[in-house]
Image (spheres, grey):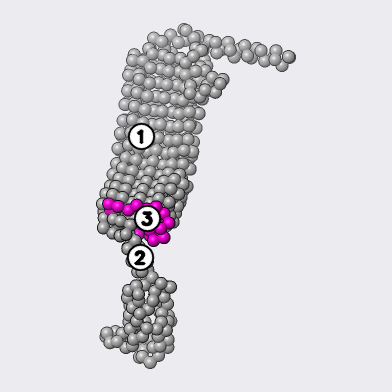
Amino acid sequence: MKQFLLFLPFLFSFYTVIGQCPESSLTLTSQAEIDAFTTNYPDCTELLNALIISGSDIENLEGLSNIASVHSVPNGNVENGIEISDNPNLTSLSGLSSISSFDGYVDVVNNPLLENLDGLGGLTTSYNRVRIENNTTLTSLSGLNIESICALIIKDNPNLTNLIGLESLQTVESLAIDGNNNLENLSGLENLTYSTEFIAIRNNPSLTSMIGISNIDTNDGVQIINNPLLENLEGLENLTTLFDVQIEDNANLISFFGLHNMTSLYQNLTIKNNNSLVDLNGLESLEYVEDHVFIEENNALESLSGLDSFIGVEFFEIRNNPNLSACSIDSVCASIINNTNYITISNNAVGCNSEEEVEEACLLGINEASISSIKIYPNPVVGTMNISLEPNVQVQGVDVFSVTGEKILTTQDTYVDVSSISNGVYFVHINTNLGTITKKIVKK
């Protein structure tokens, strides 16, 4: 009972303070309502519900300078937050600069005169999202000092050229940079080291570099879609093991450099409609994809070179790449010859236009490799030379010629006695079931 009585003053004080503020979400739709806030709520410093600012004549937020915190209500409703949207005359957020405690979302959407985010500097952690969208004159993210966040969405801000202002950000669950027409690079994200969910860089027509995120790691997915000036994927070097990677519609992409440390994927790899891509160089470390590999509609793609270390996948689809003629990499050959995986090959160039064409190339490659591995030893030779073969190679005839083209001896043995011929240089033609190869020997 004594402890309860001691707690009563605190409880009374808490609810007295809260009582001085609006009991539900605070929605302000005019400059007059903002200017009257300190008159209507003279002692209100802490909001326990959403703060919504949306009005055609709102120019500034100075009337809200007493607000120090915006928190979730005691039932843990994290859907509360700060929404600043559809304010055609708003030029500054400085009236919110006193807010230093916060645990909801922040939406800054459709404020065409807003040039920066100065005023949000007190917000360092968000358990929900920060969404900066469709602010047509926004040129800087300065003022946003958030260190940790659930989701960061920067979308459709046509005058944003970089992400400077986000230097405090260290961890994020999901990151989406989408539709920012003049965004040239991702400078500002250099201190971002971890993302627990996906990274999406989409629809940024001026983006030429992703180096700003070169310190980031993630164990989920990456989407690099429709960034027409991007030539490589430099900036993704820290990514090694992921769930899903989509590389689509990047018109000038010529290399996968940046993903050169990626070793495994636990879902899918999609490479689609990247029309300057000639090969897949940069993916040399990739060994394993658990589900699907889609390689589709890459108009300039000629070869799957770059996937040479690739071990295998459950589903392989190689379709509609009009210049792709070289598909006989080890993983594709193994899938076809051993019939171990589902594979679809169609509408590519001759040589990779069907499973049958690729199987033929695979077998030819195996044969050529087997023939090329034939060795003669010892060399130089004094008495008997030995011809070393792969198990699938059968000798059908051996001819020894002098440098003048004279046939010196013929045999079908792999152990050849040359003790009776004169010292000098000779050429040995080895005819096999897989083809013919010529080796040079020196007789001593």
Kindly indicate the quadrant of the structure image that contains residue 417: bottom left
Q: Earlier in the sequence, mark 3 or mark 1?
A: 1
- As drawn, 358 above or below 123: below
- Tell me where the magenta segment starts and ends, as one range: 326-348
Judged from the image, the secondary structure of the residue bearing numbered disc 3 is loop
Name the residue nearer the viewer: 336 or 253: 336
Estimate the x, y position of residue 435 in percent, counting from the top left.
32, 74
Residue 334 within the segment the image draws in magenta: yes
User: Closer to us: mark 2 or mark 1?
Assistant: 2
Whether residue 294 appears in magenta in the rendering, the answer is no
Q: Look at 28% across and 53% down and name the residue there.
A: 348
The residue located at (33%, 88%) in the rendering is 409
Residue 160 sits above or below residue 119 on the image: below
Which amino acid is tagged 3?
Gly
Residue that mark 3 sits on:
306
Q: Mark 1 — residue?
A: 178
Position of residue 273 in the picture relative to residue 171 (left or right) = left
Q: Secondary structure at mark 1?
A: strand
Q: Is residue 66 visible?
A: no
Q: Amino acid at mark 1?
A: Asp
Which residue position holds label 2?
Answer: 363
What is the crowding at mark 2: few (fewer than 14 residues within 10 Å), some, or many (at least 20)?
some
Mark 3 and mark 2 residues within 8 Å of each other at the beta carbon: no
Q: Is residue 92 above or below residue 241?
A: above
Q: Which residue is pictured at 35% across the width and 80% down the height?
A: 396
The picture places residue 13, in percent across and down from the top left corner, at: 61, 12
Question: x and y percent of residue 430 in the render?
Answer: 34, 79
| Mark 3 touches mark 1? (CB < 8 Å) | no
